[in-house]
Amino acid sequence: MIDDVRSYEAFLRFRRAEILERVAAAAGRSGRDASEVEVIAVSKTVGADEVVDAIHAGWTRFGENRPQELGRKLEALSRVPEGADVTFDMIGNLQKNKINQVIGRVRLIHSVSSAHLAEAISKRSEARGIASDVLLEVNVSGEASKSGFSPDDARSCAEAVVGLPGLSVRGLMTMAPAGDPDAARRTFSGLRELADELRARTGLALETLSCGMSDDFEIAVEEGSTLVRLGRYVFDQGFVR
Ligand SMILES: *Cc1c(COP(=O)(O)O)cnc(C)c1O
């Protein structure tokens, strides 16, 4: 597997080139430019050393799903060249008592899954004198196992949530059902259509559509994703597409 650091870094570099090529091709199929789609490397299953390797391999945008792990990874940044522009996004469920471990330390919170959570982030951000950039997580597919606003809740809460101080809603995030490409496509197009509706309702740009993971990112990009979140495809040598 990982024989030495240099070969893992070489693997990461190779994978990154392959990923960026596939993203560009998928963007082209939907008449968009590759520059309209950003990829974040989801580092939740690897350690801080692998994150440093990934930075050397060219990655600068990362995603973590647990506040404690986020803290560990941020500490590792002391080992990368000064001035390197590296940021983390929070992509996982966020409990209210962990909000202070996250705000001010991440570029973007993807997983604002309820109006209560939005209010709590707003309150704590305001108290700290910062504005948190967030996405509203929407359960477009309606699976019981998934968290997020239902599309109807998103419609009815959008105006109140975007009016909260200390919080800036940049767009929407969703996750598709696993192992079903047709359902994934419907989920991603549903997210895009919902964003169009909410733009008209709120006047916000909602420029970010965060959707697409290792198994379905090309479909997501074809359907308008601007931000794909890849874990296994970036880091796992055993992952095959
Ligand atoms: C783990 C995770 C990902 C990455 O999943 P892969 O299938 O490994 O690419 C993306 N988004 C969220 C919210 C995750 O928890």
Image: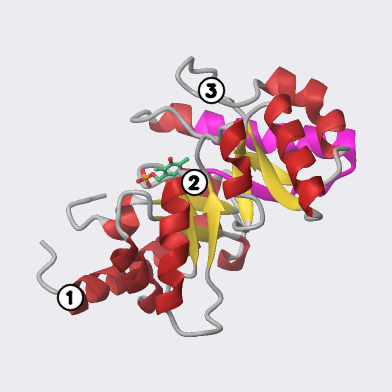
Numbered badge on residue 20: none
Looking at the rendered structure, the secondary structure element under dot 3 is loop
Give, as a three-letter code, the residue at label 1. Answer: Ser
Density class for disc 3 (Cα within 10 Å; few <14, some 14-19, many ≥20) is many
Colour scheme in the image?
Answer: secondary structure
Density class for disc 1 (Cα within 10 Å; few <14, some 14-19, many ≥20) is few
- 41 left or right, relative to 194: left
Which of the two labelled residues, at mark 2 and mark 3, occupies the earlier sequence position?
2
Q: Position of residue 74 (x, y in %)?
A: 47, 63
Front-most of residues 142 and 163: 163
Q: Which residue is mark 2?
A: 67
Q: Position of residue 43 (x, y in %)?
A: 38, 55
Cα–Cα span, label 1 and label 3: 40 Å
Asked if one can make out residue 172 in the rendered structure from this viewpoint, the answer is yes
Q: Which residue is mark 1?
A: 7
**Which residues lie in the magenta part?**
185-211
